[in-house]
Amino acid sequence: MRIDVLTLFPEMFAGVFGSSILGKAREKGIVSLHTVNFRDYSTNKHHTVDDAPYGGGGGMVLKPEPIFGAVEALTSAEAVVKPRIILMCPQGQPFSQAKAEELAAEKHLVFICGHYEGYDERIREHLVTDELSIGDYVLTGGELPAMVVIDSVVRLLPGVLGNELSAVTDSFSTGLLEYPHYTRPVKFRDWEVPEVLLSGHHVNVDKWRRQMALRRTLERRPDLLSGRELSKEERLWQEQWQREQAERAQREAQGKAREGAASDGAVETHKEAGS
């Protein structure tokens, strides 16, 4: 896979592209990572890439010429495989694991990282294939979001991770959050590893992991289960946990009631003693 990033700050990517998983993937030749300063494609003598918006208003808008020029220099009109040209912006489609898997199947990705108030709309309308957002908040530029997406995509490429199952069992890859993990020591400050993980019984371990993944999703991200059809076994697990939660809530309420009654009794005893 080839990835090109159009940015005014290519130095921001040096550490990210040369370290950890991305750095190793690059060394193995699985992915080639490049940055392009689109200021080099400015068409005026001052090399400006932004201008005031028509109609007035605050901020500056990125001009279309440098962006189009940089993208067209990276792509060939005769190329059989057209790149996905991805605009990082707050108005874009929310990025997800499913989108990462989709992009990981491509041969060439081009990311456009903007600054200032926004982009000339003609960039959106006539150049990009995808608009992506990593969340409902505003950053100073598209560089950090592009790094997030690139890391998420590259780790899915064959040969990048040491254990190919790692990407398959990650949170969101199965539609659920990932199950809990434990390692040595077995006991740490009176907290012990669940016995089933020490049993060596792979069927039971797998069942426990599926249970914990579903339970964690129900507790923390129930929205992920919207539209997902639970199996009969999963529904039984869900019903069992709901009963446990109801019983726990009842016990806590009873405990608080007893504490309240004991406190009231202590106050009455104090009053009687005072009188």
Image (cartoon, grey):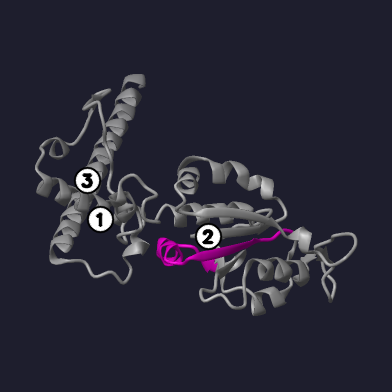
- Residue 157 horizontal/vertical position (percent): 40, 56
Label 1 element class = helix
Closer mark to the observer between disc 3 and disc 1: 1
- Residue 128 horizontal/vertical position (percent): 61, 73
Residue type marked 1: Leu
Q: Residue at x 9, y 43 (%)?
A: 201
2 lies left or right of 59: left
Are discs 3 and 1 less than 8 Å apart at CB?
no
Label 3 element class = helix
Residue named by callout 1: 214
Figure check: 262 above or below 211: above
Q: Residue at x 44, y 47 (%)?
A: 28
Query: Quarter-wise, where is residue 82 in the image?
Result: bottom right
Mark 3 and mark 1: Cα distance apart in space: 19 Å
Figure check: 173 above or below 257: below
Which of the marked residues, 3 or 1, is nearer the chain's N terminus?
A: 1
Query: Quarter-wise, where is residue 146 in the image?
Result: bottom right
Query: Quarter-wise, where is residue 124 in the image?
Result: bottom right
Which residues make up the magenta segment?
Answer: 93-115
Residue named by callout 2: 2
Q: Which mark is residue 248?
A: 3
